[in-house]
Image: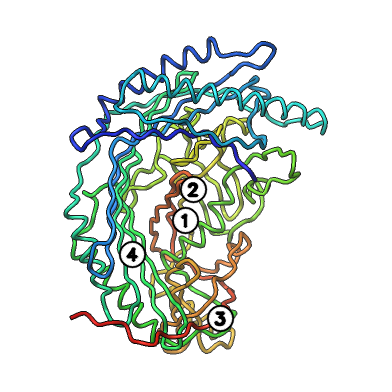
Amino acid sequence: MKKLLLFLTALFLLGEANAFDVNKDGEIIFKAMQDEMIRTMKNLKTKGAAKPHYAAYKVQAENSFYVGAFMGEKFAQSESEGDISISVMLRAGDKKTDNSFFENTVISTAEGQLPSISYESLRRALWLQTDDAYKQALDQYTKKIAYLKKKEVKQDNPDFSAAEISSDTPSLQFQPFDRDYLTALAKEMSACGNVQALKTFSVYAAIRQNAVFFLSSEGAKYIKDNSRLIISISAKADTPEGFPIEASKVLSYKNQSELPSKEELLKTAEDLSKEMQSALLSPKGTAFIGPVLLEEQAAAYLFNRTFAKNVTNTKKTLSLTNEKDYNMGEFALKKGLKVMPFDFNVVDDPGAETFDGRKLAGFYKIDDEGVKPSKLQIVKDGKLTDLPATRSSGKTNGHARLGFFENKLYAKAAPSNLFFLPQKTLSKSELKKRLMRDCLKENLDYCYIIRRFDGDNITAYKVDAKTGEETITHGFEMPILSARTLRDISAAGEDLTATNYYSSSFPPYAIIAPSVILSELELKPSQAENKKPPKLEKPKAD
């Protein structure tokens, strides 16, 4: 489905000494937004056309640093300071019916570069973007009204219900980071894979210092620190038969001060390198249907694919070309139905800032409609009891959210920090014993533990059902995981682990989940053809 994007990126040409000052320059940003907002709501109108009944400005200020290393050597680096992006959310019509949740595609970017941050340049940028947004909103509103009349559609809820709005403007300061340390770290970590067996072993370290300034026509106002540091490790190789395999690991932190010790990070890279080298000599997986244990990252991947995306976007988007809205979460119409085992609860908690000492990506105090969020019991005893909701859902619970660069006309319902809480748990050793027992019950000689999903590859270990001996395997296709898969969970561990998810088009969120056993999962060997090996061996380092 095509989507309306209202986006302006203006690059501030600042030297290192003039990097963005969150507090000082934030005052200028709010002053420019406030003054232009007053003018917009008072004077922006077209004769005979709907006026704006709501507007919101969102300005993101960012400094970033990125470095990449390949098998011990730096190969890429980039840095920018004072990048500014502006988005305008404007609703024309009235709260009962406005231009939102109706398909109409317009992509808008504004021209120019700002030589320095100033009140005048920001006012001009906001004026241009607001004017463009209003013209698009009128076009969308007119078509939506015509659609509703032609189809005789009656909306169950107003497009924008009343709500108590809030403000939160803490003093922020970007924490400093050490470019030389991160560069040396990336080089040392990537050197862990500089072995003859591996084709590539890369490490990327990326810092994004991101401050968000929000103001609505109703007076909602906030500042958020969406900074993060990502370390990504990726490896690729070909087995002796020429079958391509790969593995990766992504580590996320709020800032550099949260990084583990260098020794711990190097061990993470070394472990991935050793795992890849073992996989190269491992047997290729054969067809399997039976119990499978998903641990840590693989378990988080399961819940992300089958649950998180299905509680997102809980209101249908009307469309001229498509009677169905395929972007609507699958659980949107399943309240009261069983979606998980009866001994599972799921809680969405935007107010959870940390878990087990780690910052959670989904933490926030005010949503993108200016409303304080509520803690939600989404699943109770396996049944779906609640869903994230916005002011377009009839009654909001403060879960209206936009991604970092998801500059749409309106925020959609999305989760924050999803806690998957089994009422009965097993220790790690007990979970493996349970897996082996389940295999023997089905007269299987072996079963599988999956520890990681990597793109089109999975890291799977074949487990002898009698002895528990583990053998790494390679060559499985990505298994089919759907909402139905959740009901196949037969046991869960006590090892709740937090995994943060970031995307340019989706708001950051976290999944806090245990390892789980699926009573049945089908694993298929990949049908990809082996590559022809190189005529010469990989050159050896001197």
Q: Position of residue 431 (x, y in %)?
A: 44, 73
Q: CA distance from mark 2 to mark 4?
A: 31 Å
> Which amino acid type is shown beneath numbered disc 1?
Leu
Instruction: Identify whether 139 is placed above or below 375.
Output: above
Which residue occupies 24% across, 82% down? 540
| Mark sitting earlier along the chain (3/1) | 1
Rounded to the nearest angstrom, the CA distance separating label 3 from label 1 is 33 Å
Q: Quadrant of the C terminus?
A: bottom left
Tell which of 461 and 216 is nearer to you: 216
In depth, the one of 284 and 352 nearer the eye is 284
Q: Residue at x 72, y 31 (%)?
A: 156
Q: Secondary structure at mark 2?
A: strand
Task: Describe the element under mark 3 as helix, strand or loop.
Answer: loop
Q: What label does residue 233 carry, if any? A: 4
Q: Which mark is residue 347?
A: 2
Q: Earlier in the sequence, mark 4 or mark 1?
A: 4
Asked if 500 appears above or below 53 in the picture, the reply is below
Q: Could you tell which of marks 2 and 4 lies nearer the N-terminus?
A: 4
Q: Earlier in the sequence, mark 2 or mark 3?
A: 2
Residue 55 is at least partly visible in this image: yes
Q: Residue at x 42, y 50 (%)?
A: 502
**Is mark 2 in CB contact (under 8 Å) with mark 1?**
yes
Q: Helix, strand, or loop for circle 1?
A: strand
Left or right of 492 on screen, residue 523 = right
Query: Which of the marked residues, 3 or 4, is nearer the chain's N terminus?
Result: 4
Would you name the residue on which mark 1 appears?
A: 421
Residue shown at 42%/73% (left/top)? 246
Q: Residues within 10 Å of mark 3 (few under 14, many from 20)?
A: some
